[in-house]
């Protein structure tokens, strides 16, 4: 192989390249004049930055200051240091506000409440009740500036300052441009009170806020789980609101997403079963877009949140400035507490029920139970209330049982009619109604007493799951009358039943089975008629449904149904043995048959219609 050598031509080439590089280097060196100009520019930039930092410190210290607006470098440095549109950058951190019952933390960034804790309540795991914690809530205002930039108060820094208004604590949070130009959130907390007065106002910003663009207030919150059963808790977790002249409405409790836009909104309640986060305003919101998203898919111990709430509403300027007086309520959904705020009507956020049912719950059962539980143990108070209710309804029970006894006496005659006219349904119905009319018996008389009891039953059904007085009150083996009792934990979950066994629903199911056996005995004998329901099936279905349905419900409600059915059974036995006499009833019915019975207009109309139908049927056969 030939060996390569460095010849004279290669050496000359390298020397030429090196010389060219040295020549180019010296050509790019700045002249003394250029060096002097660069030094002057650097000193100017450093001076501008120092001036801007001094301005920022002066503004934060509430000292008047000025800046050379012709100096673009200083202006850029100033805006960068103090934030968007001249709002000063205060220190980060949170400010505490608390009284005997409520603890709040307000973030300097955004000026919003980032922690709300109940001091006197814990959840089922003995953890303090938090309504706001770890970023589950946001409260901010979006607005446009005069140069058409969009700002959000969540990005602004607020300076806190404390003062006192009598016994009240006042926390002022100000996002400042200068001493006389700011946006303020003002919180005023009273002693031993869950309601905090809240004011949003601006000063000197009429040239900063663009009045031609909407100013949107947005409040978002995810409800934190507090109860053992998240499915049960979620049933009573709702977004409730007052609008259109004290009309109370609710978003759906179970749909994945429910959205509404309402007008003239007075207050909004993000209810979390037994605790509520409420925003009320003295000047009603003209319009508000509301939404509720269900976050619970199944019963799981890992589920942390129940629903996600969102409210978006517009604030109005007054003489170019913001001024909105409002109130925050973070506290129990307790009638005794919320009833203190009658001017705001917050007690209506409690789900008493609708119409007459809600009225009975609110004005009868709630005060009656409050009275009983003031001197009796809470479980005993439920039993006493149940006894009083059943005794008050005993005349209705008597009427119902009397109707059943009359139907039993007439059974042989009805059976004879059925056999004689088994091929003619229309004629059979006519003869049966004629028999009822002569005997003075109405087949509906047994249903009417049951219908009269429905308002009572439904009102009590709403009372027990929503009564704050029952929360975490124990009785016998039940640790919490507002939640389910547990006598055995299953190693697996049964669909629609759960992963535990509750004893009170079992007792209530047994009691309702015996009650159904007594009340449907005569009806089962009558059910051979066409169209009559299968009473035997209903007798077995009702206890099974109660067993499954109430296994995850409040044990106080199951206790009520157990005692109620037990008392009803004893009342019916007493009526049957000591009050009603079937021989006397039979004699009375026979006596009634002998008396001429005048038809009322309805009976006459029904008879004529049936006769016409029978005549048409005969004509059609011919």
Image (cartoon, grey):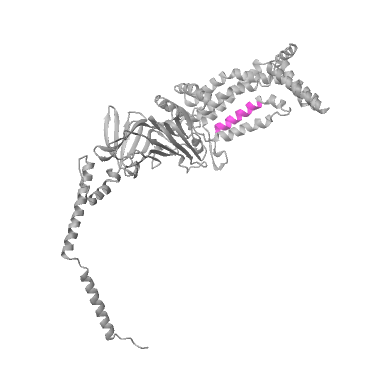
Q: Quadrant of residue 283?
A: top left
On screen, residue 95 versus residue 284, left or right, reads: left
Q: Which residue appears farthest toward the top when viewing the image?
A: 595
Q: Is residue 469 visible?
A: no
Nearest to the observer: residue 97 or residue 121: 97
Q: How many marks?
A: 0
Q: Quadrant of residue 275?
A: top left
Q: Quadrant of residue 263?
A: top left
On screen, residue 186 versus residue 273, left or right, reads: left
Query: What secondary structure prevails in the magenta region?
Result: helix
Q: What are the residue bounds of the magenta stretch?
A: 503-517
At 23% from the left and 77% from the top, the residue drawn is 19
Q: Which residue appears farthest toward the front when viewing the image?
A: 212
At 77% from the left and 24% from the top, the residue drawn is 614
Q: Is residue 562 visible?
A: yes
Residue 622 image position (x, y, % from top left): 83, 27
Q: Which residue appears farthest toward the bottom when viewing the image?
A: 2
């Amino acid at each position: 192989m030939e060996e390569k050598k460095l010849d004279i031509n290669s050496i000359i080439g390298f020397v030429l390249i090196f010389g060219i590089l040295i020549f180019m280097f010296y050509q790019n060196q700045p002249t003394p004049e250029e060096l002097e100009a660069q030094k002057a520019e650097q000193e100017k930039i450093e001076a501008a930055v120092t001036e801007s930092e001094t301005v920022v410190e002066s503004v934060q210290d509430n000292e008047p200051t000025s800046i050379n607006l012709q100096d673009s470098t200083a202006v850029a440095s100033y805006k960068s240091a103090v934030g968007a549109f001249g709002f000063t950058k205060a220190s980060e951190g949170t400010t505490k506000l608390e009284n005997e019952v409520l603890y709040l933390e307000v973030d300097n960034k955004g000026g919003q409440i980032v922690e709300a804790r109940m001091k006197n309540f814990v959840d089922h795991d003995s953890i303090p009740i938090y309504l706001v914690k770890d970023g589950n809530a946001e409260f901010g205002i979006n607005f446009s500036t005069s140069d058409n930039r969009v700002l959000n108060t969540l990005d602004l820094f607020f300076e806190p300052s404390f003062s006192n208004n009598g016994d009240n604590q006042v926390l002022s949070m100000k996002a400042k441009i200068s001493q006389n130009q700011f946006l303020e959130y003002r919180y005023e907390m009273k002693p031993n009170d869950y309601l905090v007065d809240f004011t949003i106002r601006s000063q000197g910003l009429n040239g900063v806020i663009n009045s031609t663009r909407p100013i949107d207030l947005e409040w978002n919150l995810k409800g934190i789980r507090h109860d053992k059963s998240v499915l049960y808790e979620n049933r009573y977790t709702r977004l409730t609101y007052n609008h259109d002249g004290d009309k109370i409405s609710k978003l759906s409790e179970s749909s994945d997403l429910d959205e509404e836009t309402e007008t003239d909104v007075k207050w909004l309640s993000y209810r979390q079963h037994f605790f509520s986060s409420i925003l009320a305003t003295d000047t009603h919101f003209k319009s508000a877009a509301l939404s509720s998203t269900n976050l619970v898919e199944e019963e799981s111990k890992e589920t942390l949140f129940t629903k996600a709430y969102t409210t978006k509403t517009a604030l109005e300027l007054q003489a170019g400035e913001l001024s909105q007086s409002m109130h925050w309520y973070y506290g129990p959904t307790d009638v005794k507490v919320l009833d203190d705020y009658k001017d705001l009507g917050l007690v209506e956020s409690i789900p008493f029920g609708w119409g007459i049912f809600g009225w009975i719950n609110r004005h009868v059962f709630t005060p009656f139970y409050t009275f009983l539980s003031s001197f009796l143990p809470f479980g005993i108070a439920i039993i006493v209330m149940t006894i009083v209710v059943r005794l008050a309804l005993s005349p209705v029970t008597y009427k119902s049982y009397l109707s059943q006894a009359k139907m039993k006496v007439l059974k042989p005659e009805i059976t004879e009619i059925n056999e004689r006219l088994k091929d003619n349904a229309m004629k059979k119905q006519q003869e049966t109604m004629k028999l009822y009319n002569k005997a003075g018996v109405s087949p509906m008389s047994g249903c009417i007493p049951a219908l009269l009891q429905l308002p009572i039953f439904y009102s009590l059904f709403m009372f027990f799951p929503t009564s704050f007085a029952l929360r975490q009150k124990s009785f016998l083996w039940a640790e919490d009358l507002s939640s389910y009792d547990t006598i055995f934990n299953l190693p697996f979950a049964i669909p629609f039943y759960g992963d535990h066994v509750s004893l009170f629903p079992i007792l209530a199911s047994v009691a309702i089975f015996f009650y159904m056996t007594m009340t449907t005995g005569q009806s089962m004998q009558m059910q051979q008629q066409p169209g009559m329901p299968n009473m035997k099936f209903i007798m077995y279905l009702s206890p099974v449904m109660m067993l499954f349905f109430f296994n995850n419900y409040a044990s106080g409600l199951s206790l009520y149904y157990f005692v109620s059915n037990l008392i009803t059974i004893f009342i019916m036995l007493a009526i049957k043995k000591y009050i009603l006499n079937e021989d006397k009833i039979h004699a009375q019915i026979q006596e009634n048959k002998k008396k001429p019975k005048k038809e009322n207009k309805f009976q006459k109309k029904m008879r004529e219609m049936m006769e016409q139908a029978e005549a048409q049927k005969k004509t059609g056969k011919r």
